[in-house]
Amino acid sequence: MTTVDVDLKYIWHPAAQMKDYEKFRPLAIKRAQGVYLYTEDGREILDIIGSWWCSLLGHCNERINKAVTEQLSNLEHVIFANLTHEGAARLVQRLSKILPPGLCKFNFADNGSSAVEMALKIAFQYCAQTGRERKIKFACLEEGYHGETIGALSVGSMDKYTAVYKPMMMESIHIKAPDCYRCPFNCTRDNCKALCLSSAKESIEKHAHELCALIVEPLLQGAAGMRVYPEIYLKGLHKICKDNDVLFIADEIATGFGRTGEMFACSKADISPDIMTLSKGLTAGYMPMSIVCTTQQIFDAFYDDYQKGVAFMHSHTYAGNPLGCACANAVLDIFEDENILDEARDSAAFLTQVLNDRFGGHKNVGEIRHIGLIHALELVADKDSKAAFDPKARTGYNIYRHALLEEGLLLRPIGDVLYFNPALNIKKEDLLKAVDKMSRSIDYVLGK
Ligand SMILES: *Cc1c(COP(=O)(O)O)cnc(C)c1O
């Protein structure tokens, strides 16, 4: 039996109707280098989505490989209760210098969703221990995404995939998200005055007495379809939370580490959240690791004599994993030494130009939006009315399938939103190649 035969016999893949796998069998990847994956049967695949947004500096990056290999021969893992190690200490000291001011305490988890869970619990317990006992609810944006565990789902958008879990979930306040492509005020991102903030303001003021925190994906709602919204909205939302004594949790799992053109989206918008979650780019996609960053003020609410019972009694087996920390330190080394942000900004400007030239006049490309090196094309049935394709037609999926199998391009759209979120050090020639491959795949499915 081949790898794929064995896989299909036993494995349940993420976020999939497994019946689809009968006709669209998985590809067995043998090795990877830079932005390229190589299959067992010798095919080359251009990974333009950073393997689910986490391969930040390319697959099998030489410097990260070296750092992990060195770490591996010294210390692979150690319990993080009462024990510590140099990699973790060095990492958080470095993070404290580059994060928005005020974030100076760090608690480790082992994936994005568990960092979100931890952030929610810290916020909740902080309120309980600072005389805010009635503040027990969370607010979030309607199209938000913060992971798949039950707490994280509870502060995410309620769609057809999550509705089934509703009886298991806590009740959150869902705020209408900014929707710049279909702006109800007919503004553009450039002349935005964040008029849609009024509904956020109304909800937050109305619920302030029971609201512990708001969680938000800063500047980019990734899973919603790479929806980019302006800094003015984020700044406004932050201020509304401050004015109403509602903690502000920035989920930078997707936006952190240069994805938006700055190291962190919050820095770009010049705000300091009370709590920030990091994962994905943190280890450049090498190791499952996440960190919850918070302020001295929040930390202090948990700091007292043991008998007071106010400690944060939360743990993850792999907290502070040394291999993860070695990756994260190598990522920061590379940012420091290799001009990654400048080059990514240059590549981003190039890609914006190429996509606008190529697809600006396309009858089915409703919007080309971008932040940092992340670029997205929203496909629509009709450009004037911005009407979507019938979801049953699975337009994005069909383009994805064609691109992967016939063009060797890993796209994996969100619905009918095709996007690029590649390694920040991708070469321009590879960006061009990806555009060509995507273009032919769109033509194949939608006709010229
Ligand atoms: C990916 C993601 C998560 C969840 O992270 P996992 O490691 O997949 O659990 C949470 N929030 C945001 C913004 C993400 O992009």
Image: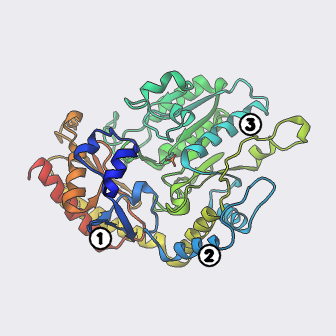
Per the rendering, the mark at residue 430 is 1
Alpha-carbon span between mark 2 and mark 1: 31 Å
Residue 128: x %, y % from top left? 75, 30
Task: Place residue 101 in its image quadrant.
Answer: bottom right
Question: Could you tell whether 97 is left or right of 39 in the image?
Answer: right
Question: Could you tell whether 263 is left or right of 11 in the image?
Answer: right
Q: Earlier in the sequence, mark 2 or mark 1?
A: 2
Q: Amino acid at mark 3?
A: Tyr
Residue occupying image coordinates x 51% and y 21%: 167
Q: Amino acid at mark 1?
A: Asp
Task: Place residue 14 in its image quadrant.
Answer: top left
- Label 3 lies in ligand 1 vicinity (Cβ under 8 Å): no
Q: Earlier in the sequence, mark 2 or mark 3?
A: 2
Secondary structure beneath dot 1 equals helix
Residues at marks 3 and 1 touching, judged by CB atoms closer than 8 Å = no
Q: Nearer the viewer, residue 208 or 224?
A: 224
Check disc 3 and report the residue beneath it: 126
Residue 383: x %, y % from top left? 18, 42
Per the rendering, the mark at residue 396 is none
- Label 2 lies in ligand 1 vicinity (Cβ under 8 Å): no
Residue 354: x %, y % from top left? 24, 65
Check disc 2 and report the residue beneath it: 70
Colouring of the image: rainbow
Residue occupying image coordinates x 18% and y 59%: 406
Q: For the residues carrying marks 2 and 1, which lies nearer the camera in this image? A: 2
